Amino acid sequence: KAGVTQTPRYLIKTRGQQVTLSCSPISGHRSVSWYQQTPGQGLQFLFEYFSETQRNKGNFPGRFSGRQFSNSRSEMNVSTLELGDSALYLCASSLGTSGKRETQYFGPGTRLLVL
Amino acid sequence: GQNIDQPTEMTATEGAIVQINCTYQTSGFNGLFWYQQHAGEAPTFLSYNVLDGLEEKGRFSSFLSRSKGYSYLLLKELQMKDSASYLCAVTDSNYQLIWGAGTKLIIKP
């Protein structure tokens, strides 16, 4: 079974630009979560999508948005990039069973550098 | 607020044993995960505890005490490939995962 894939793997942008990251979950998984990882900060939860709906949201500004398509693929968009947005963005997929603990499976991440 | 604490960095010797601690304060508890993340790679699942006690899986074991808000990951017979960051994450009452900052483990020969 193919794992979680993320594109692109690396990205360099300048301040003020916007960026779109893509995530394809494991086949059969309906939940996709997005995280930002920076050195010393650990994984910061951005949002979770299930069945094309945002189910949970972290404490990030509105510049960070996402969506999920009917095939469970998800995209994350960051507008008006700031230097502090430089990070590794990880996507994780799970079955999406509500009210139960689930193991999340992570993609390799997209490393974003904002200059 | 919700908080998970882990040591930032630990060093151990090849062949030895190391214990990585994790303490948590969350709104509710529905389980605790340990993940391993090698530099430049995605986190991978190691273990899950929801009941008190020790779960053993090969060279790795994970312990949980819900009353103390405490867990540890025990790594035995350390190998160089165990050099990685170890992430502790707790599922809260809303089944949302709260992540610690991770512990970077350095293995020396």
Image (cartoon, coloured by chain):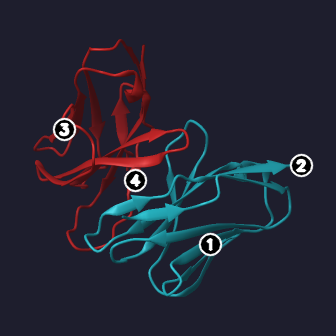
Chain colours: A red, B cyan
Q: Is residue B3 above or below residue A22?
A: below
Residue positioned 67% across, 72% down in the render: B58
Residue B13 locus on image (x, y percent): 86, 56
Return the residue at label 1: B72
Q: Residues within 10 Å of mark 4 (few under 14, many from 20)?
A: many
Amino acid at pointer 4: Tyr
Q: Residues within 10 Å of mark 1 (few under 14, many from 20)?
A: many
The kind of secondary structure element at disc 3 is: strand
Return the residue at label 2: B109
Check if mark 2's residue and mark 4's residue have beta carbons within 8 Å: no
Check if mark 2's residue and mark 1's residue have beta carbons within 8 Å: no
Between tags 2 and 4, which lies in front? 2
The kind of secondary structure element at disc 1 is: strand
Residue A9 locus on image (x, y percent): 42, 26
Per the model, the C-alpha gap separating discs 3 and 1 is 35 Å
Per the model, the C-alpha gap separating discs 2 and 4 is 31 Å
Residue positioned 81% across, 65% down in the render: B77
Q: Is residue A39 above or below residue A114?
A: below
Q: Residues within 10 Å of mark 3 (few under 14, many from 20)?
A: many
Q: Does residue B76 appear to the left or right of B3 in the view shown?
A: right
Per the model, the C-alpha gap separating discs 2 and 1 is 24 Å
Per the model, the C-alpha gap separating discs 1 and 4 is 22 Å
Amino acid at pointer 2: Pro
Amino acid at pointer 1: Tyr
Between tags 2 and 3, which lies in front? 3
Return the residue at label 4: A105
User: Is the residue at mark 2 from the same chain as the one at mark 4?
Assistant: no
Return the residue at label 3: A66
Per the model, the C-alpha gap separating discs 3 and 4 is 19 Å
